[in-house]
Image (cartoon, rainbow, N blue to C red):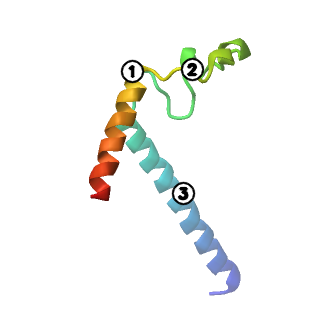
């Protein structure tokens, strides 16, 4: 067996491994995909639109919301429990 045959076998193994990786990725995607999602093609719609610069004028909000305050409160209680 010369060096060229060894390189050819190694190339074949790499190609086979890549095929298995792609097939495995496809199988995982199919098991977790929502209806209408493609494996490579991105769906069109509101999800992939970029907001206008005028929408960012109110970011960040001047006052934290009630939900954000609740998260801060629960985080502080959690950290107090870790310190004691």
Q: Is residue 37 visible?
A: yes
For the residues labelled 2 and 1, the Cα–Cα distance comes to 12 Å
Rate crowding at label 3 as few (under 14), some (14 to 19) or many (20 or more) other CA atoms within 10 Å: few
For the residues labelled 1 and 3, the Cα–Cα distance comes to 49 Å
Tell me the tag on residue 66: 1
Instruction: Quadrant for the C terminus, please.
Output: bottom left
Tell me the tag on residue 18: 3
Task: Determine which residue is flagged by label 2.
Answer: 61
Are circles 1 and 3 on residues that touch, CB within 8 Å?
no
Position of residue 44 measured from the top left corner of the image (x, y, whole percent): 57, 18
Task: Determine the image quadrant of residue 51.
Answer: top right
Residue drawn where x is 56% and y is 15% of the image: 46
Rate crowding at label 1 as few (under 14), some (14 to 19) or many (20 or more) other CA atoms within 10 Å: few
- Label 1 secondary element: helix
Q: Earlier in the sequence, mark 3 or mark 2?
A: 3
Side of 12 where 66 appears, left or right: left
Residue drawn where x is 46% and y is 26% of the image: 37
Side of 76 where 56 appears, left or right: right
Callout in the foreground (1, 3): 1
């Amino acid at each position: 067996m010369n060096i060229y045959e060894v390189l050819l076998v190694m190339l074949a193994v790499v190609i086979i491994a890549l095929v298995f990786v792609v097939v495995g990725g496809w199988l995982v995607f199919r098991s977790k995909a929502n209806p209408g999602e493609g494996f490579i093609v991105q769906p069109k719609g509101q999800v992939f639109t970029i907001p206008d610069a005028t929408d960012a004028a109110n970011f960040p909000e001047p006052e934290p919301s009630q939900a954000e305050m609740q998260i801060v409160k629960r985080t502080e209680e959690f950290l107090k429990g870790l310190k004691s």
